[in-house]
Image (cartoon, helix red, strand yellow):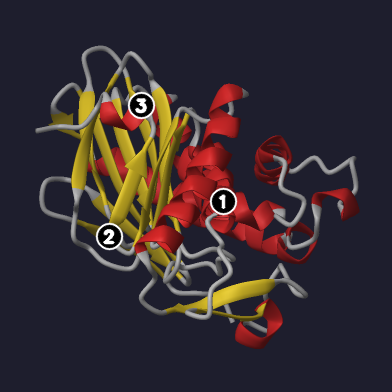
Amino acid sequence: MPYEKVINVLHGGAVMAECGPMRLVISAFVGKVPQPDMGKRAAEESFKYLEQVAHLRDLLGRRCTEIPKNLEDSLAVKMIRSVLTVGDEDLTPMAAVAGTIGDAVADFLVNRGMTRVVVDNGGDVAVRLLGDASVTVGIRQKVDKQEISNVIALDSKLPSLGVTTSGLGGRSLTRGVASASTVIAETASMADAAATAIANASFVEDEKVIQRPAEKIDPETDIAGLPVTIKVGPLSEKIRAKAISRAIGRAKQLIAKDIILGAYVAVQGKVAMTSFFKERLAE
């Protein structure tokens, strides 16, 4: 049965688009003037993007090596490229789905003259900034909570950005113990795949870390056969430090290859971030 499609204009001119599992909040501006009509057009496009991906869901839930190389769908190709670039063999293209749809909506708006665009796809955010546009983005220590722990300031020196978060309690299963792994890259698609990989890298063996096979938690998972974290009890300072060290270490590998710009990792209140985040913290 097709999902119901709902579009609502919010206070301040942002537009919310809801369709099944997807909930986008789209903010589009020319200068400082909100453009809700253009936001509604983008919302309609977002439904097409979701349907485009859903049509290929079974294929995109496979490892990249199992997907035909002659696939031509533009969104699918971008998802595959992002995951292959990050380089974790246990990721499927679905690790980049939310960011890829966010990017597509953001680019649709920029291509129609918008100068400041923020597309929030359930916490995975695509940002486009032109001219003197700028934006602040809130960072959470827990992916499943709304409380903001830090704010970073972004400007048009980097006109295309993605800010995405993965971790325990998020929409997708995780193999690590990070309560939040937030990544900034030049696209939300790349940031989405990388945030998943960095969150997974935070895994530590400990009696307080409970894992189960992914298919036992979600029969439709794209990572069947792999253990995922379902619960983490209070961890010692040493174990939290080890988890963060592993995650930040993975992030630094991706930064060194120019795949991402920066990362922020939180494990039970203990936080570490790379220089890109530190330099942009807003007071």
| Residue at screen point 11% across, 53% down | 11
Structural distance between the alpha carbons of marks 2 and 1: 36 Å
| Residue at screen point 47% across, 72% down | 20
**Circle 3 sits in a helix, a strand or a loop, which is it?**
helix
Q: Which residue is mark 3?
A: 275
In the rendered structure, the answer to whether residue 56 lies left or right of residue 40 reads: right
Asked if one can make out residue 21 in the rendered structure from this viewpoint, the answer is yes
Which quadrant is home to the C terminus?
A: top left
Name the residue type under label 2: Gly
**Circle 2 sits in a helix, a strand or a loop, which is it?**
loop
| Residue at screen point 48% across, 54% down | 242
Q: Which residue is mark 2?
A: 269
Structural distance between the alpha carbons of marks 1 and 3: 34 Å
View extreme (front): residue: 238
Res 148 quadrant in image: bottom left
Dot 1 and dot 3 residues touching (CB under 8 Å) = no
In the rendered structure, the answer to whether residue 142 lies left or right of residue 162 reads: left
Name the residue type under label 3: Ser
Asked if one can make out residue 48 in the rendered structure from this viewpoint, the answer is no
Give coordinates of residue 115: x percent, y percent: 29, 22
Give coordinates of residue 64: x percent, y percent: 81, 50
Give coordinates of residue 260: x percent, y percent: 52, 30
View extreme (bottom): residue: 216
Dot 2 and dot 1 residues touching (CB under 8 Å) = no
| Residue at screen point 18% across, 21% down | 31
Q: Which residue is mark 1?
A: 49
Q: How many numbered discs, if any?
A: 3
**Circle 1 sits in a helix, a strand or a loop, which is it?**
helix
